[in-house]
């Protein structure tokens, strides 16, 4: 199942590039799935890591995911998928609320995604300086609000012992990026 998810993600994201980079987009879902695998995630969660952006950024639909991967993967991908018709702040607030109230797997998927995004931003910041923020829909202060809010919400309903091992890394990187 994980190989099928990888193949679908590779095909769906073909030709897409990462922000601030000439890297193929697929490096992001690959790294997210690796974070989830290293954190002890289930096969369904690792599949969702591969597929977390396909509905949002490609022609693949949530029903395509359901037909090929079943309800568990679909629910994870659906919980992560933003409604791009909504304004930026409303979309991000929805994600924060989803992290706050979501299951452990939903929290893990979103935080793994945000961790990889922050790792990329941090690398780009070293290379580009403050110009890194020019390529985002929202600038530094809004990004700071968003990433800090996810960090504040991720432990809601969890003890630190029950959280995935990459949660502390995310919290530390938020502090380093937005000091």
Image (cartoon, rainbow, N blue to C red):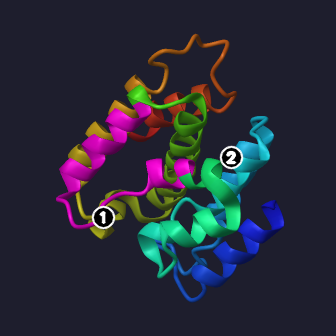
Q: Position of residue 176 (x, y in %)?
A: 46, 35
| Depth check, front residue: 57 or 69 | 69
Q: Position of residue 48 (x, y in %)?
A: 63, 54
Dominant secondary-structure state across the stretch colored magenta: helix
Range shown magenta: 75-99
Residue 76 colored in magenta in the image: yes
Q: Residue at x 40, y 25 (%)?
A: 153
Q: Position of residue 91 (x, y in %)?
A: 26, 52
- Mark on residue 45? 2
The answer to whether 157 is drawn above or below residue 71 in the figure is above
In terms of image quadrants, where is residue 74?
A: bottom right
Can see residue 179?
Answer: no
Q: Which residue is mark 1?
A: 136
Q: Looking at the image, tell me whether mark 1 or mark 2 is earlier in sequence order.
A: 2
Left or right: 139, with 173 as reference point: left
In terms of image quadrants, where is residue 100?
A: top left
Quadrant that contains the N terminus: bottom right
- Mark on residue 171? none
In the orientation shown, which residue stands out farthest toward the bottom? 15
In terms of image quadrants, where is residue 87?
A: bottom left
Q: Position of residue 160 (x, y in %)?
A: 60, 13
């Amino acid at each position: 199942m994980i190989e099928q998810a990888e193949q679908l993600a590779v095909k769906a994201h073909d030709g897409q590039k990462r922000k601030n980079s000439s890297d193929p987009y697929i490096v992001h879902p690959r790294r997210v799935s690796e974070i989830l695998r290293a954190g002890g995630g289930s096969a369904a969660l690792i599949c969702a890591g591969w597929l977390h952006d396909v509905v949002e950024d490609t022609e693949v639909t949530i029903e395509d995911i359901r037909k090929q991967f079943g309800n568990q993967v679909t629910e994870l991908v659906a919980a992560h998928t933003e409604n791009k018709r909504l304004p930026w702040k409303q979309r991000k607030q929805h994600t924060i609320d989803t992290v706050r109230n979501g299951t452990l797997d939903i929290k893990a998927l979103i935080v793994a995604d945000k961790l990889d995004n922050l790792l990329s931003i941090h690398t780009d910041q070293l290379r580009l300086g403050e110009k890194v923020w020019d390529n985002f829909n929202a600038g530094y202060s809004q990004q700071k609000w968003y990433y800090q809010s996810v960090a504040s919400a991720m432990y809601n309903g969890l003890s630190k012992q029950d959280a995935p091992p990459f949660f502390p890394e995310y919290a530390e990187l938020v502090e380093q990026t937005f000091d």
